[in-house]
Image (spheres, grey):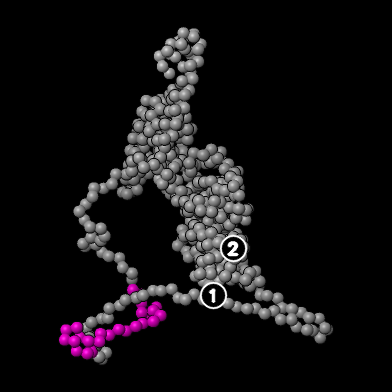
Amino acid sequence: MNRQEAERIYDSGRETVIEKLLSFAAHIRKLEQSIAALTRNSSNSSRSPSSDPPGIKKAKKKAKSNRKQGGQPGHKGRNRKLLPIEEMDKIHDIYPERCEHCRNPLSETLINPFAKPVRHQVFDLPVIVPFKEEYRCHSLLCHCGHSTAALLPEHVAHSNFGPRTHAAIAYLASVHRVTRRGIAEIMQTLFGIGISTGAACNAAERVSNACMPVVGAIKQYVASALTLNIDETGWKDQGQRRYLWTFVAPQAVLFHVSPSRGAKVLRKVLGDTFAGIITSDDHSAYASYHKNGLRQLCWAHIIRKLKALKDDRSSPQAYCFARHMLLDIEAIFSQWHAFQVSGGSREQLLLDTLPMREKMHDFCIIFRYSTDRKVQTRTQRLLDNWQNLYTFLEYEGVQPTNNAAKRAIRPAVQWRKICFGSQSETGEQFTGRLLTVVRTCQLHSINVFEFLTKLVKASFSAKQHLPALPLSLPN
């Protein structure tokens, strides 16, 4: 717009000027929102660090030292420990042929009794040959003239592939996120077992069904846990929106795929009520479900939102509010980290953090009626959830962030990016059940492959005992 156009608008009357100013104001607000969106990064939003643009300031690197890379002088090296001789499959005794000093030939009988042999152990994979068995069901002719054919034994009647093959397929799919086509290639190349992609899918489904009893036990344990970290992330089923929920208890992790992100999923998994403490973000489903129970809001989410409010600089009030809140939060967490390192009583911790907590509450009261709508929203959310902000200061075993659930759900997010979700309800069940069993086994340092093998054996034959996980229900 030039001066002549501005004068023409001014001369056209009061209403035209007001209408034009309002139009400009709306356009400015839209531009401000666009600029604010450009400032979003992993430090002030839920974006991952890998999505940060090149211009984002990273954490300050330490000053470059003059030391060379690698182990420093005096550093104790970490080498592979030698196994006992009894565990070796083969031992090779090597003797020198000549003296390195005078070059005279040496005999094995001239062993130095004061020098122990230098031991060097080599580990290699054996040539993998699959174990192949054939079962022949014969028919016998009775005196009455009737011919009776034998039936296959129960443990082999389910499939052409044994429990360890089933476990390997499920392990590759759920832990290493290998596609079904990739699994078929690995089975052929490494193990010498030819298998189609359809047979691999059927084997994965059998393992999923075999996991049902263990998943049921884990669900029962999670529903009665004293503390629980919960999070959810997007999932797909044939392109349709789904949500992958994770429930992290001290001794188990449960995954559940659902089309809903609402409180009904929590009621389905945990029951109508939950007696423990839930740590989560401020998603409304948690407040709706656990409104009369103890909760802990994730401080990592709160800090990121305050940083976004500060970085947006939408108004002086927004910057001032966010800056002072972040300073007090930093002071509280300094006290928290000192408590974790040196110990002490929680009563003293509550007294030490009381001034900062009261100051933050006063700030929220003052800025609740700010002219900046973002500040109004943030202060109201904080005040509404004030009783859920400091549970970690009072109760043992409660962390101030939801990092436990974030770490548990990360492999599932990586899996989603590779496979783009599920293609059927059976695939959804496989995802939830296998992630549950795998993550819980890893939590207890249990060999996942061997545990899955035992599960398949138990599902193939009633004579096999179902393996159990070390889950102790609280009193």
Q: Is residue 330 visible?
A: yes
Q: Is residue 221 left or right of residue 85?
A: right
Q: Nearer the viewer, residue 130 or 227?
A: 130
Q: Which residue is mark 2?
A: 197
The crowding category of the residue bearing disc 2, from other C-alpha atoms within 10 Å (few below 14, some 14 to 19, many at least 20), is some
Q: Is residue 29 above or below residue 341?
A: above
Q: Is residue 149 left or right of residue 91?
A: right
On the image, the x and y values in percent for residue 41 come to 40, 40
Q: Is residue 414 above or below residue 349?
A: below
Dominant secondary-structure state across the stretch colored magenta = loop
Q: Which residue is mark 1?
A: 130
Camera-near label (2 vs 1) is: 2
Q: Is residue 271 left or right of residue 348?
A: right
Indicate which disc residue 374 carries.
none
- Residue at image location 27% in from the left, 65% down from the top: 77
Amino acid type at mark 2: Thr
On the image, the x and y values in percent for residue 86 come to 38, 80
Q: Nearer the viewer, residue 95 or 360?
A: 95
Q: Nearer the viewer, residue 43 or 253?
A: 43
CA distance for labels 2 and 1: 19 Å
The verdict on residue 94 being magenta is yes
On the image, the x and y values in percent for residue 114 come to 22, 83
The residue stretch that appears in magenta: 82-106
Amino acid type at mark 1: Pro
**Dot 2 lies on which element?**
helix
The verdict on residue 239 being magenta is no
Q: Nearer the viewer, residue 415 or 473?
A: 415
Count the numbered circles shown.
Answer: 2
Q: Earlier in the sequence, mark 2 or mark 1?
A: 1
**Dot 1 lies on which element?**
loop
The crowding category of the residue bearing disc 1, from other C-alpha atoms within 10 Å (few below 14, some 14 to 19, many at least 20), is few
